[in-house]
Image (spheres, coloured by chain):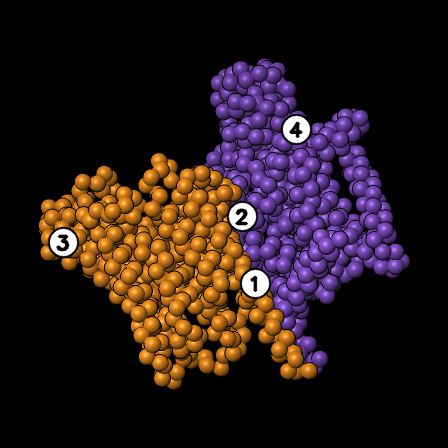
């Protein structure tokens, strides 16, 4: 039994890391609330400005371009069609689980209000509730991992108080993807006799992919682990894979089957996106140049093939090393991506908390601050996408810091692998 | 090995060979036929990259240098008639052609020419009448010439003639028809796939990875495209593979000869000499225990010897061309001119074909447009770049393996040596290289990728060996730097 003081501190940290970012994030992004500081970027969110307004607000330019059917659009506009469906009625670039949450909040909002501003507010409250719920799950899962698996104090959770969590939480759906990924990881890592656990972990990881795709690296790691270790527990792998397929693959197939147009838009949207705050910007300054996308696809493929070949995980791998693998897997798809929107860092942060050594968390904190400043300064410049603007210097600072951390993590994994083989040899000789 | 195992093995190798023969044959023939049909649909107006130059020059070489005519179907006999000026071409189309039962193509704008086709006797009586009426400059039987000024005299002097001889031979023996002039390159393509299989089998001693490697190479975009059209780089790639095969068999003279023959198709084939002379020089330097000095001496020795041999063979195969052009003109244009052509910046600007740097090929960047389809899509000379990039990364990481796996060492030397050749000429001034040159590297991409994937998966300690080698090397470098700084 822990001493009361320690339990109190833990409780305080949990309450602080849960309530602080949630309350602040909801407050700063709430429509109609004026902030003491006049940075437009702090008010911006994908939930409202990036999607809700361009799709539903008749005051917006080119609103019709977002809709597949003019008839449905006019039906929505005159109030006879209250629940337009993403992918089917209008273009929506996020995966299906996000689409589902989006549908629930928008449908509810339009059922209860005819005013677009009021509907926006209801939609915002519902989305905030979803995000807050998943954030609580995330913090608690991280706490359990730190307490039961890594057996360290939960002080690391304080990383969540860094500005990026606050600025980007009630902003997009990255925290939901992260939460599902960490919860799934917790279930796999804790193990147990329950046969449902691998299936549930697979379902959660699949759902995470269906929220933001970029957590697919986590699933890839577990597949490689199962294959390279040639686990005797084949049934566990099968159950995990079934889970991933059900919630991470089937939704996309169903979407393709049911709303091909919407599916094609989702795919093309991501394929045609420009270099958004990407790592390669200092090398090629034209954000529309295809080299950014080509570099991402090439580097991600190379990492996905080379890493398992040279440094595959091993039987009885230590949890500390396993979390480094997971951090590297998350890094690979986000840091090297030609689209590294600032909110995406929220998918890295939880794995940094469990995968990085304390001294490197300080460096991660620096990257987090740079990252928060991207959107904060974004609307203060006429061309914030161009290299040379302050937001892009912030992105550059973030990217370089994260690259250094990535190199450290990979180097550390390779060192651990060498040590492991040496230990094995020592035993056999 | 028991009798049963032997039979089983023979059966497996037969099935594997059948697969690596059939799949590329079907794919390459299909692609080439598709190009042929498109060419016919477009009435000979489709532009398939540099093929138009090589094929035209092959036809000219056959007629003007060897005095031979291409084989043609007498019912569908074609002839290009070139006039002094385009007025005569138009007058011919308006005044004479309607009196004959022949098909004409009268839309040439850059060359004053008319293309006629039909029954052979009818075509020739038409030509005779035209000849009497208007000043005809040239008559070239065969498929339609591309619409380009001076194409009726073009012999593509900047590249060695062997590839064009081969294309001309197919025109002479089989016929002057788009599919027929692609038969040599298709055959070289199929041979390349078989060689990829054989080399991988030699390296891995396993059927599955060998078949997978050969098939991946076959289905790669760049392989299917380049081995379906009559351009020289495919010939070079296959001869390079033959050279590697000989090198793996330790038949270095044959390996060198194959590389030199590759250089008789296109000078870039000579890059293949780089790995061979490294292997040879290292081998002899080890035998003589002469160390680095001997190694450098033998590198230079074999380098000079190879170039000398290439120049001699080039002179021999170019004798008919030299005889036609005049020896001094041939020396100036085909030898000295060729070197400066290869090291020059060819064409830059919005109207030029997209050029690339050799490293761009590994990212599918700045790819060369080989063909514009009628539906508006474009066929690019571009491999499956994520795999190309991965292969290069793996190759560089796996350099330490060269010292413990000799056969792989040779393969890696070929891969990186040839790549170094392209980078070398880039440094020397050839800044406008085209992505279809990358076919030269394509087989090595897949041999390397599949061999390493197979080896690392089979022996997990191999990865550790590589990591440790790099770790030790870096440690040594750091120690040296420390020593220097402390001194």
Mark 2 secondary-structure assignment: helix
- Residues at discs 3 and 4 both on one chain: no
Q: Give the x, y percent position of residue A220.
A: 45, 66
Q: Nearer the viewer, mark 4 or mark 1?
A: 1
* Cα separation between marks 2 and 3: 47 Å
* Residue B268: image tag: none
The residue to which callout 3 is attached is A110
Q: From where the camera sits, is residue A388 visible?
A: yes
Q: Position of residue B186 (x, y in %)?
A: 61, 49
Name the residue tied to disc 4. B154
Circle 3 chain: A
Picture residue at 45% right of the left edge, 59% below the top: A362
Q: Is residue B3 left or right of residue A370?
A: right
Q: Which chain is purple?
A: B
Q: Is residue A19 above or below residue A382?
A: below
Q: Residue at x 46, y 69 (%)?
A: A323
Mark identifier at residue B363: 2
Among the chains pictured, the one given orange colouring is: A
Q: Which residue is mark 1?
A: A411
Dot 2: within a 10 Å radius of its alpha carbon, few (fewer than 14), some, or many (20 or more) residues? many
**In the rendered structure, which disc, 1 or 3, sits on the residue that comes first in sequence?**
3
Q: Nearer the viewer, residue B244 or B176?
A: B244
Chain designation of label 4 = B
Q: Marks 3 and 1: in contact by CB < 8 Å?
A: no
Subunit that carries the residue with mark 1: A
């Amino acid at each position: 039994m822990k001493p009361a003081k320690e339990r109190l501190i833990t409780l305080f940290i949990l309450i602080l890391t849960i309530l602080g970012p949630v309350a602040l994030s909801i407050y700063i992004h709430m429509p109609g609330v004026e902030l003491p500081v006049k940075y437009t970027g702090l008010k911006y969110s994908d939930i409202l400005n990036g999607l809700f307004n361009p799709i539903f607000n008749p005051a917006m330019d080119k609103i019709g371009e977002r809709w597949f059917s003019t008839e449905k659009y006019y039906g929505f506009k005159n109030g006879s069609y209250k629940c337009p469906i993403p992918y089917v009625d209008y273009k929506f670039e996020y995966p299906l689980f996000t689409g589902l949450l989006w549908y629930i909040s928008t449908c509810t909002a339009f059922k209860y209000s005819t005013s677009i501003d009021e509907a926006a507010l209801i939609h915002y409250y519902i989305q905030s509730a979803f995000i807050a719920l998943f954030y609580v799950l995330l913090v608690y899962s991280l706490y359990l991992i730190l307490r039961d698996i890594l057996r360290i104090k939960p002080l690391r959770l304080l990383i969540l108080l860094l500005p990026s969590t606050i600025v980007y939480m009630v902003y997009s759906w990255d925290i939901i993807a992260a939460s599902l990924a960490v919860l799934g990881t917790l279930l796999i890592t804790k193990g147990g006799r329950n046969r449902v656990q691998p299936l549930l972990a697979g379902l959660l990881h699949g759902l995470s992919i269906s929220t933001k795709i970029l957590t697919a690296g986590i699933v890839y790691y577990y597949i490689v682990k199962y294959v390279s270790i040639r686990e005797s527990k084949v049934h566990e792998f099968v159950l995990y894979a079934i889970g991933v397929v059900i919630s991470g693959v089937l939704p996309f197939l169903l979407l393709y089957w049911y709303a091909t147009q919407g599916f094609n838009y989702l795919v093309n949207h991501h394929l045609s996106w420009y270099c958004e705050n990407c790592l390669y910007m200092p090398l090629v300054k034209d954000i529309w140049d295809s080299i950014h996308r080509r570099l991402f696809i090439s580097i991600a493929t190379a990492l996905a093939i080379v890493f398992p070949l040279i440094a595959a995980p091993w039987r009885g791998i230590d949890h500390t090393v396993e979390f480094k693998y997971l951090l590297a897997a998350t890094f690979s798809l986000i840091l090297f991506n030609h689209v590294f929107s600032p909110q995406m860092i929220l998918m890295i942060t939880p794995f940094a908390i469990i995968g990085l050594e304390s001294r490197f968390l300080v460096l991660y904190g620096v990257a987090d601050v740079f990252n928060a400043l991207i959107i904060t300064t974004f609307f203060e410049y006429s061309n914030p996408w161009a290299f040379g603007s302050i937001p892009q210097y912030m992105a550059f600072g973030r990217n370089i810091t994260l690259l250094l951390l990535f190199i450290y993590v990979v180097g550390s994994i390779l060192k651990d692998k060498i040590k492991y083989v040496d230990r094995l040899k020592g035993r056999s000789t | 090995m028991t009798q049963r195992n032997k039979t089983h093995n023979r059966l497996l190798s037969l099935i594997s060979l059948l697969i690596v023969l059939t799949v590329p044959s079907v794919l390459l023939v299909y692609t080439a036929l598709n190009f042929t049909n498109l060419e016919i649909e477009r009435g000979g107006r489709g532009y398939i990259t540099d093929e138009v130059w090589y094929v035209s020059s092959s036809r000219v070489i056959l007629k003007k240098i060897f005095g031979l005519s291409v084989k043609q179907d007498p019912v569908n006999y074609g002839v290009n008639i070139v006039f002094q000026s385009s007025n005569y071409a138009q007058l011919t189309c308006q005044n004479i052609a309607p009196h004959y039962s022949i098909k004409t193509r009268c839309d040439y704008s850059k060359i004053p020419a008319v293309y006629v086709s039909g029954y052979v006797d009818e075509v020739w009586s038409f030509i005779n009448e035209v000849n009497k009426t208007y000043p005809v400059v040239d008559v070239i039987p065969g498929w339609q010439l591309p619409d380009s000024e001076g194409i009726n005299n073009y012999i593509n002097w900047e590249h060695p003639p062997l590839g064009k001889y081969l294309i001309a031979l197919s025109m002479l023996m089989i016929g002057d028809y788009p599919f027929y002039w692609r038969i040599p390159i298709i055959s070289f393509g199929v041979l390349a796939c078989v060689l990829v299989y054989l080399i991988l089998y030699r390296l891995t001693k396993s059927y599955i990875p060998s078949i997978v490697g050969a098939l991946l190479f076959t289905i790669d975009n760049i392989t299917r495209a380049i081995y379906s059209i009559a351009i020289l780089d495919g010939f070079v790639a296959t001869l390079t593979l033959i050279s590697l095969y000989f090198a793996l068999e330790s038949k270095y003279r044959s390996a060198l000869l194959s590389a030199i023959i590759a250089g008789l198709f296109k000078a870039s084939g000579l890059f293949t000499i780089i790995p061979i002379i490294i292997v040879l020089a290292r081998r002899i330097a080890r035998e003589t225990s002469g160390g680095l000095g001997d190694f450098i001496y033998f590198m230079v020795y074999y380098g000079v010897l190879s170039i000398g041999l290439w120049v001699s063979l080039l002179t021999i195969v170019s004798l008919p061309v030299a005889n036609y052009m005049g020896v001094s003109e041939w020396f100036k244009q085909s030898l000295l001119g060729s070197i400066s052509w290869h090291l020059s910046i060819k064409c830059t600007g919005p109207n030029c074909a997209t050029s690339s740097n050799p490293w761009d090929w590994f990212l599918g960047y700045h790819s060369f447009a080989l063909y514009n389809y009628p539906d508006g899509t474009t066929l690019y000379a571009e491999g499956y770049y994520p795999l190309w990039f991965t292969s290069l990364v793996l190759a560089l990481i796996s350099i330490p393996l060269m010292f413990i796996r000799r056969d792989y060492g040779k393969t890696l030397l070929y891969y990186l040596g040839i790549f170094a050749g392209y980078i070398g000429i880039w440094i020397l001034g050839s800044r406008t290289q085209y992505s279809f040159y990358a076919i030269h590297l394509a087989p090595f991409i897949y041999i390397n990728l599949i061999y390493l994937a197979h080896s690392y998966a089979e022996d997990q300690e191999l990865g550790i060996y590589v990591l440790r080698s790099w770790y030790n090397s870096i440690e040594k470098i750091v120690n040296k730097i420390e020593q220097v700084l402390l001194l």
